[in-house]
Image (spheres, rainbow, N blue to C red):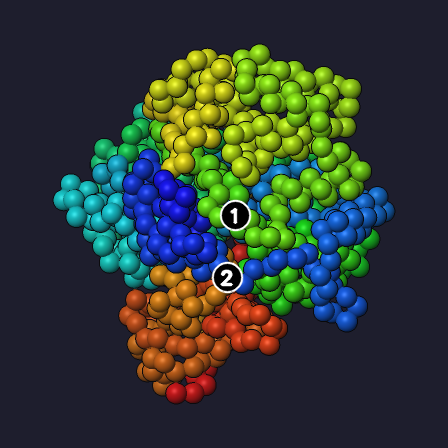
Amino acid sequence: MSKNNHSTACILCSQNCGITIEKDGKGKFSKITGDKEHPVSEGYLCQKATRLDYYQNQIRLKHPLRKKADGTFEEVSWDTAIKDIADKLVFIRDTYGGTSIAYAGGGGQGNHLGGVFGTVFRSACDTPYIYSALAQEKTGNFWVNGHLFGRQNTNYSEPVGEADYVMVIGANPVQAHGIPKARPTINEVSRNPDKTLVVVDPRRTETAKKADIFMQVKPGKDAYLLAAMLGYIIQNGLENKEFIEERTIGFEQIKPHFENISVGTYAKICGVAEETIISVARGITQVNTFAIRSDLGLEQSLNSTLNAYLVRLLFLLTGHFGREGTNCLHTLFFPLVGHSKEPEQGGRTTQVTRMKGIGKLFPPNILPLEIDNKHPRRLRALWVDSANPATNYADAEAQKKAMEKLELLVVIDVAMTETAKLAHYVLPAQSQYEKMEATFFNLEFPDNFFHLRHPVNEPLEGTLDEPEIYHRLTSAMGEIPRSFPLLAAIAKIDRRFPGLRLLPGALGITTFFRPKWKKYQLFILKETLGKALPYKYAKAAAFIWIASHLYVKRYEKAVQRTGLKGKGYALGEALFNKILNSPSGTFISKHQYDEHWTLIRHQDKKVHLNIPELLTWLDDLGDNNQKEEAQNALYPFNLIAGERRTYNANAIIRNPEWRKTDGAGALKINPEDAREYGIESGDTVRVISSKGSIKIVATITDEVMRGLLSMPHGYGLSYGEKNDFKEVGAKVNMLTDVNYCDPLAKTPYHKNVRVKLEKISG
C-alpha cells in the first residue's frame, strides 16, 4: 500500500469488514473500497463504510475541557486535567469506597484495545462496575450460556451460509449484517433450491422478503412461537434422542414443561398459523443441518432471557450442534466478557438495586437508579469511554437527571456528545483511525480470525489515545510510575532475541519486588515492549503480545494448523508477529469439529439443559400474556424503538450529512393505521409513551403490520460548532423506561415500547 492507501476495517458494526482507504493530501478519506486481501470479508462492503470520512473528519474535540461554575467549559492542559481528575477519584475512592465509582462504555464496535486498558484503570479505582452496550443487549444470552455450557463467556457461531435449513429470528442480516458477507450469504441461501430460509419477525424486513417461509410473529410473542415449536417436537417424539443421550443431561427434567404446551393456543397468541409452526418444526428435525441467527429482536423483546433459552433448546434438542453447518461454540482470541458468580455464590451485586453482574457487566437500565438516590453507598463518580449514555441508554431523561447529580463525571470521546455536555471533564481521544486498534468480535468456528488495525492518519494535535490517558491517570493516582527505563532497555534486546525470554523474566522479578505493580503490568508492557515494536503508535499493541501467548497456551494445535511453526512460547511469538505484520488481518486458528466439545466448560463436557428459573417462567407464559394484553389498552401501538436502517449507526457518526436517504429518520406506520388517524407520508406526528413524547415524520408502508410502529436509533444528535444548533430527527430514548426491562438480566424492552399516536400537521 502507498502512503495514501491504507488497509484497515470498518467500525460501524460488529463484522468490522476490511476496507482500503485512499486519502488526499489533507487526510480526508477520498475513497473507501472493500479490502480484497481481508481473509473474511474478501472485498465485501456495505454502503455505510463508504461514508466513514464523516466520522474521521467531523468536528473534533482538540483540548481537555473543564466545566466552570457557570456551566460553560474552559480549555485546560492535559497535566491539569489529569491531576484534577486523579485527585477527585482518589478522594471518592478513599472516602466512600471503590464501589462508589462506575465505568460506562469502553470499546464500541471497534475500539477494544482502549477498553482493555480501561480494565486496568478500573483496578486503580477499585471498582467492579462496568456498564456497557453489551449489557443492554446480550447479558440474557450470557446468563443462559453459563448454565448450558458452563461459563457465561462461551458463545456460539451462526453458520448461516453452511446450513441446509436456516432460521433468522429477531435479526435482519440484509440490513443489519451480524454475519460475514451478510447480503451475498442471505442471497445464496434464498436462491438455493436445496436450502430453506425461515425468517421470524413482526416486520416484513429486507431479509423476510427473501425468505422461503416468513413467520410474521406478533410483537413480543416470540417466546410463544418458540415454545410451540419445541412443544410439538417433544410431544411427537421428534427430538434427537441419540444426541440428547450422548451430549446432554437434564432432558427428563425439562420434558414435562413442554408436554403441557397447547400448540394451537400458542399459535393464536403469537399470530403464526399452527400448520406453519408444525411445518417448520418438522422441517428442522428432518434436515441434515440447521442453524439459527438471532439478534436484538429477541434480546430486547419481551421474555428476552427466556427467548435466549428457547432458541438454544431448538437446536440442542434436535441435535443440530457441534457439527459443520450447525451452531458451534467457538474460541475467543480474548474474551470481551467474563463470568460472574451468582450472588449466593459470592458474586458481585450493585449497592442500591442489588443487581447481580452477568459476564462481569452491569445493565445500563439500572444506572440512574444507582446514582439518583440518597443511599450512602450510591454511585458518585462515573467514567464514560466511547459511549453516550445520555442518548443511547434507556430513558434519556432519567439518565440525564442522574448524571447531573454526580460528584464527578468524566467523558473520553472524539466529539462533543450529549453526555460530554453534562460532564465535569471532557478528554479528547484519538479517532479509531489514528492509532493501533482492534476488535475482539472474532466469533467464528472452525477457523478464527483477528485483525490488528494500523493507523491511517496522524493523531489530531491535542488528543491522546485511551491507553495513554489511563496510564497517566493511574500514575497520577500514585499507583505506578509513568516510565520504566531499565525494563524498556531490556525490551529492545528482547525483541532482537525473543527466544531468551528476557522481558518476561525481568517483569517477573520486578513484580516480585513490587507486588503492587502486578495488576498494572499492561501499562508496564505499553511503555517497554510497546516502545520496542517496529511501528509508530504501536504501544497499545503490547496487549496483543499477551493475548497471543495465552491463546497459544490453550489452542496450540489449532494455531499450528494456520501454517505457523514452533511450539509453546516460540509459537506465541510467531502468532504475535503474524498479527502485527498482517495489515489486512490473519487467521489465528483452525479447529476441527471434534474439538468443539472441549469448549464446553462443564466438567462432564455435556450441555446442562435444565434451568429451573426459566422453566418456571415458561410455565407462566399463558398468565403473562393476559396481563400484557390488559396493560396495552392505554397505549395501543407497539413501537420498535431502534430499527437498523441504511444510514444509521448508533452515535458513531454525528454529522447528519452522512445520510444519503431517510435524513429525518421517519416513523414507519401501516397504511390502515395511517388512514384511521388521517396521516399521510411526510406528516409530522407525535409519539407518546408513559415516559415522554417525540415529534417525528411519518412514512406509510405495509412493511409493518397493523398496530406496529418502527423508528431508527442514532438520530436526534446535536452537531455543530456552537450549542445553539438544531438536532436532526428524534431521540428514541425519550420514550423508553429504565423500569421496562427483562426481570432477570434487565435488558430493555426496546422492541416492545407501548405508545399512542397523534397527528400534528400535514
In front of the other: 98 or 352? 98
Look at the picture and state if 84 lies above or below 487.
below
Callout 1: SS: loop
Pick out the residue farthest to the bottom. 762
* Residue 725 visible in the snapshot: yes
**C-alpha separation, residue under disc 1 versus residue under disc 2:** 15 Å
In the picture provided, is 720 more to the left or to the right than 295? Answer: right
Q: Name the quadrant of the N terminus.
A: top left
Number of the front mark, 1 or 2: 1
Q: Residue 643 appears at what percent x and percent y?
A: 41, 61
Look at the picture and state if 3 lies above or below 555: below
> Does 366 sit left or right of 533 as displayed?
right
Which residue position holds label 1?
458
Q: Residue furthest front?
A: 25
Q: Please, what is the three-letter code of the amino acid marked with disc 2?
A: Gln
Q: Nearer the viewer, residue 584 or 369?
A: 584
Residue at 75% across / 39% down in the picture?
475
Q: What residue is drawn where x is 56% and y is 52%?
A: 460
Q: Residue at x 34, y 82 (%)?
A: 680
Q: Position of residue 357 (x, y in %)?
A: 62, 42
Most foreground residue, 278 or 468: 468
Q: Secondary structure at mark 2?
A: loop
Residue 378 in the image: above or below residue 684: above
Ranked by sequence position, the earlier of labels 1 and 2 is 2
Query: Which dot marks residue 58?
Result: 2
Residue 173 pos. (x, y %): 33, 51
The kind of residue tagged 1 is Glu
For disc 2, the neighbor class at 10 Å (few under 14, some 14 to 19, many from 20) is some
